[in-house]
Image (cartoon, grey):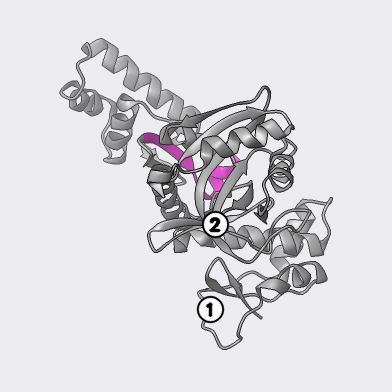
Amino acid sequence: MKLNENYIKTNVAGVACVIPVGEAVQEMHGMIKLNATADAIWDQLAAGRNEDEIVAALAGQFDVPADVLREDVRVFIGRLRELHILLD
Amino acid sequence: MKLSIAELTVEIFPAHELLQERVGPYLCDEDRQPDLCFDGVTERYYRDRAAEHPEITLAESEYLYSGVYFYEQLARFEGLMLHASAVELDGLCYLFSAPSGTGKSTHTHIWLRVFPGARIINDDKPAIRRVNGRFLAYGTPWSGKTDESVNVGVPIAGVCFLGRGENAIHRLTPSEAFPLFMDQTVRPYDKSLMLPMLQTLDTLLREVPFYQMTCDMTDDAAHMSRSAMQPTEELL
């Protein structure tokens, strides 16, 4: 799993979001706001972790039942794949 | 030729009359060292953009896309652009931003009529820069169809996103204003410019008051926006 380099995560005025640059501006005109969980998952993906490793790492950070967290990670990763933000 | 725009020395090579005419008020001493040079922006680039947009001529392409280049490069100088009509009153600048056709220019032109001494700094695309610790709005050669622009920089009192409706105005938090701003600016194509642009925007959102209003086209609307946005005595 590799993040598309044409999407940058940033934090402006306390809003965590992903913004397209370069060729990705043809694909997406807006931006994606990230909640705290999505923000943390993005950082884990950027560090090269796989789905199981991400769930394990986030279990310590968020007070959420394990099955809910696993589902959140699965859904977010699936969405990033659909948008070609997460490659292979 | 050398221009002075937004307190930057710009070297530019206009080939067509439209851009040549618009840069006239910005000409400066040829001996100055440029902060920004258009040497990488070629006739071929303007020709390719014109080919993508058959509705514009080559001269219009040069005018529009030289502006896009300038506004993207502003990111290197703590600057960015807002699609807005910028009006000055009593030494402070008030920016009204909205999609084309909403009435931002109509609103600022009510200010001109109602408030003596008011003038338009840039009617469509003011440059914004942080200079010596404060944000200023600047006139530029790129100001939309009307070419209403003055080669000055004026400290910004506030920025207001405008829509049509009954007269009402409220303050926005920085996080509320952020997506509205992103919809009305030039987003740099290159990551190396996008990152500093976002950093400048973060500072702007924290240091300058932002508002959202709905308004009609009456004088009351101008009185409302002025009284909401003008700094109170203690702040001056």
Q: Which residue is at a point 21% across and 21% down the rendered structure image?
A: A62
Q: Could you tell me the amino acid type at mark 2?
A: Gly
- B81 vs A32: above or below: below
- How many numbered circles are shown? 2
Secondary structure beneath dot 1 equals loop
**Chain name for mark 1:** B
Q: Position of residue B22 (x, y in %)?
A: 74, 67
At x 52%, y 69%, the residue is B7
Q: Which residue is mark 1?
A: B34
Can the viewer see residue A87 in this picture?
no
Instruction: Name the image quarter holding residue B138.
Output: bottom right
Queried whether the magenta region covers residue A25, the answer comes back as: yes
Q: Earlier in the sequence, mark 1 or mark 2?
A: 1
**What range of the chain is rendered magenta?**
A15-30
Residue marked by disc 2: B91
Between residue B229 and residue B153, name the one nearer to us: B229
Does residue B26 appear left or right of residue B196 in this picture?
right
Residue farthest along the bottom direction in this orientation: B31
Q: Secondary structure at mark 2?
A: loop
Q: How many residues crowd around disc 2 within 10 Å: few (fewer than 14), some, or many (20 or more)?
A: few
